[in-house]
Image: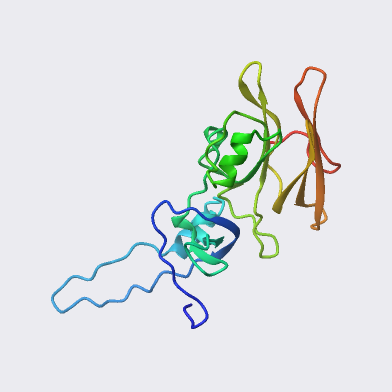
Amino acid sequence: EQRDDNILVKLDNLSNFEIVSWRFVPKSQDALDVDNARKGEVKQVKGKTRNAEIEAAKESNEPEKIDEKYDIWYKVRLDRSVSPAPAGWVFGRQVELQVPSDIVFYQQNNKKYVTWQRLDNIEANDKFAAANKDATKTSKPGSWVILSRTNIVKAQEGIEPDFDGILVLAYDKYNEEHYSAYRNNDVWGLLPLKVEGTGDNKTFVLKLRGANGEIEEKRFVTFKDAKGRLKVTVPEGIATTGK
């Protein structure tokens, strides 16, 4: 909606900005198929409407897809040199998250990363890259906590989870390879992701829906064992191994 108290800003291709939050907006029903053909012309018959396709999927017991039910809008913060407005909204199909090069290889088409944080100490070069908003570049591989989201509708009381998967991806510097320290693909959670602590002992805090339907803060503790392998202490009530 355009009003006197807001502005419209055209962003250049490959523009960078900070995502503050996002919103799932139910898609409107396709316009009705109106017979507006002129005399002597053949009426163009449209295919099924989106709602009809969704109903057909339900009848065949297929899970409902997020990109079929919703449009996603990102609330973003732009640099002052781009816009004087403190924040604005961008249509989600025009946005691609800049996943760091260290972990982008592990992202799957049916499970997109929504946020991530490093669990090891950040090198000076990485701090410089972060300060310059070059999120795809890191000076060296490391260990990460990553939250992901499938394309399946999982609304509870009309609210979709921000993430439904947790991955702790550790890095073995001697073998120079990543390995999965913890994975759980059966959670219902809301952002933000908070990481606390220093050195090898870190804690990350998540807001997860419990069996009683209440949102609770859960603390996951990471540490290294005697062999230097990253381990995760999982809070009570959360599966120790994921699907």
* Residue that sits furthest to the right in the current view: 236
Depth check, front residue: 151 or 101? 101
Left or right of 186 in this view: 58: left
Residue shown at 52% from the left, 81% from the top: 5
**x and y, in percent, of residue 97 in the image:** 52, 48
Is residue 147 visible in this depiction of the protein?
A: no
Left or right of 148 in this view: 230: right
Residue shown at 66% from the left, 47% from the top: 164
Depth check, front residue: 152 or 58? 152
Q: How is the image coloured?
A: rainbow
**x and y, in percent, of residue 190 in the image:** 70, 54
Residue shown at 18% from the left, 70% from the top: 42
**x and y, in percent, of residue 122 in the image:** 67, 35
Left or right of 234 in this view: 154: left
* Above-or-below relation of 199 to 75: above
Is residue 61 visible in this depiction of the protein?
A: yes
* Above-or-below relation of 85 to 169: below
Quarter of the figure with the C terminus: top right
**Residue 154 lies in what quarter of the image?**
bottom right
Residue shown at 57% from the left, 51% from the top: 63
* Above-or-below relation of 53 to 112: below
* Residue that sits furthest to the bottom in the current view: 4
**Residue 30 lies in what quarter of the image?**
bottom left
Counting the numbered discs, the total is 0
* Above-or-below relation of 222 to 91: above
**x and y, in percent, of residue 101 in the image:** 53, 35
Depth check, front residue: 78 or 53? 78
